[in-house]
Image (spheres, rainbow, N blue to C red):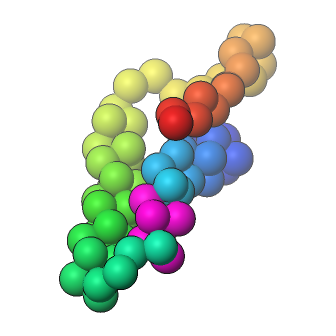
Amino acid sequence: MSFLQRVAESLEYSSLIDRAVLASSSVERFHLLTAFVVSTLSTHLERMSKPFNPLLGETYELKVQG
């Protein structure tokens, strides 16, 4: 997997940080930031599959939800 793909996947749920900035209480901010950290860890658990190989013509496209 390329470094760019790993960085892009870790920022897939960056909307949680945007929501944390607008949160009214510190507890809500903490929950949103914790959810963001857990979401970045969960993408690494599924990395036991075939690695990204650009020599075979594979490409990567990040699809942002929202």
Residue 62, placed above or below residue 40: above
Which of these two is toward me, 18 or 49? Answer: 18
- For the residue pair 9 and 25, the one nearer the viewer reads as 25
Residue at the spot 49% in from the left edge and 76% down from the top edge = 21
Indicate the quadrant containing the N terminus: top left, top right, bottom left or bottom right: top right
- Does residue 30 appear in this view? no
Q: Nearer the viewer, residue 10 or 4?
A: 10
> In the rendered view, does 51 fall on the left or right side of 37?
right
Q: Residue at x 63, y 41 (%)?
A: 5
12 w.r.t. 41: above or below: above
Vertical side of 47 occupied by 17: above or below: below
The picture places residue 22, in percent across and down from the top left corner, at 47, 73
The x, y position of residue 12, in whole percent, is: 52, 46
Asked where in the image residue 47 lies, by quadrant, the reply is top left
On screen, residue 57 versus residue 30, left or right, reads right
Q: Whole-percent x and y of residue 59?
A: 72, 20
User: Which secondary structure class fits the magenta region best?
Assistant: helix
Q: Is residue 10 left or right of residue 2?
A: left
Furthest residue toward bottom: 26
Give the x, y percent position of residue 4: 70, 47
Q: Is residue 36 above or below residue 49?
A: below
Farthest top residue in view: 56
Q: Magenta stretch?
A: 16-21
Q: Is residue 2 visible?
A: yes
Q: Is residue 24 magenta?
A: no
- Taking the spot 22% from the left edge, 82% from the top edge, the residue there is 27
